[in-house]
Amino acid sequence: MSTSGQPQFRYTQTPSKVLHLRNLPWECIEEELIDLCKPFGNIVNTKCNVGANRNQAFVEFADLNQAINMVTYYASSSEPAQIRGKSVYIQYSNRHEIVNNKSPGDIPGNVLLVTFEGVEAGDVTIDVIHLVFSAFGFVYKIATFEKAVGFQALIQFSDAETASSAREALDGRSIPRYLLPDNVGSCNLRISYSAHKDLNIKFQSHRSRDYTNPYLPVNPTANGGFVQPSVGPDGKRIETESNVLLASIENMQYAVTVDSIHMVFSAFGTVQKIAIFEKNGGTQALIQYPDVTTAAVAKDALEGHCIYEGGYFIQRQK
C-alpha cells in the first residue's frame, strides 16, 4: 500500500511486458519514463501523456521478465517509484505491445486540429482564432466545425515547424478573457496535428477563411459580416473599401521584410498587422490599418510607387 492508501499494483492482472504508469506529473516526457524504467531492462517503446488528464503512460520492455522485475521491485520496496517527487503507480497493462508510439494527432504537420473547451460554436469567432494563432506565423486557412467533442477548427500554416511552435505554446492554455464574450468563463485549447496538408476552402464565411485568396467568393448564406463583392457591367469585380491592403511587390532586387513594409506604410497611420507570403512566384503582403480611411490614403499615395530602388508596389484593397 502507498502512503496515501491507494494500491500501487493490481496483483490479479496477468503479467505483460507493457506496464501502465499512473499519477505521473502533467506533461511527463519520454526521457523521464526511460530514466525510471531503464534500470530494469531494455525499453523498446513508450506512449506518454495518455488519459483525460494526460498523466498516464505505457512503457514496453523488450522482455516479459524485465517488466516483472520492475513490478516486483516496487511492490516490495518501502519507497514508491517517483518522478519529480510524485509517487507513480505501476501495474501490468492489458496490452502486450505498444503498436504505435505516436497517434496520428502526434505526428507533426502544417495543419492543427484545435478543440475549444468550455464554449459553443459562435462564442469564439474566426477572427479571434486568427488573432491568437497568427502570433506564431502567417495563417493560411481556417475551417471551423462542430463535432460530438465540441467546437473545433482546422488551422493551416505554411509548414510543420510553424504549426509546432503554435501547438507547443498554446496547447492546454486559455484564450485571453478579453477576447471572449461576457457569457463565457474560459476557453481552453486542446491541440493536435491533423492529417490534412491543404484545406479546401470554397467560400469566405464566418466559418471558413482562406487568407491567401482575398478574391475567393463569399458564401451569401453565412457571410458573418462580410460584404458580397460587387460586379460591374463588364463582369469584373468592383473593389470595395477595406481597412486591409493587399500589396503585390514587383521587380524585387532586394529582400522585402516586415520592417521595411512597416516603415513605408506606417507613414500614413498605425499599422496593426503585416503578413508577407509568396504566391504564384511573387511576393505579396497584407497590411492592416485600424480604419478604411487610413488604408485608402495609403493606397492612393503608394500604388505604383517604388518602395526603394529596384522594386515597386501594386496595391489592391482586400
Image: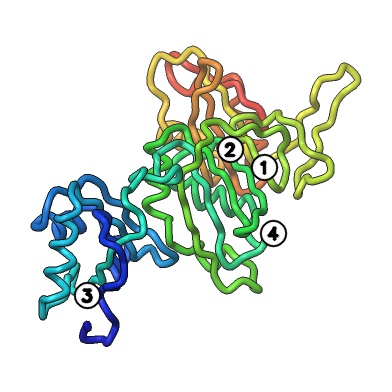
Question: Which corner quadrant holds the C terminus?
Answer: top right
Q: Residues within 10 Å of mark 4 (few under 14, many from 20)?
A: few
Q: Secondary structure at mark 2?
A: strand
Residue with the mark numbered 4: 122
Tell which of 249 and 198 is nearer to you.
198
**Separation of marks 4 and 1 at Cα, in angstroms:** 13 Å
Going by the numbered disc 2, the residue's amino acid type is Lys
Q: Nearer the viewer, residue 80 or 30?
A: 80
Q: Is 292 situated left or right of 14 in this image? A: right
Q: CA distance from mark 1 to mark 2?
A: 8 Å
Q: Which mark is residue 87?
A: 3
Q: Return the disc, 4 or 1, that comes first in the chain's sequence.
A: 4
In this rendering, position of residue 293 left or right of residue 97:
right
Element under label 1?
strand
Q: Earlier in the sequence, mark 1 or mark 2?
A: 2
Residue 226 in the image: state x and y as whole percent.
76, 44
Circle nearer the viewer, 2 or 3: 3
Q: CA distance from mark 3 to mark 1?
A: 46 Å
Residue at 84%, 31% in the rendered image:
230
Q: Do labels 1 and 2 touch, CB within 8 Å?
A: yes
Give the residue type at disc 4: Gly
Helix or strand or loop: what does disc 3 sit on? strand
Q: Is residue 46 left or right of residue 198?
A: left
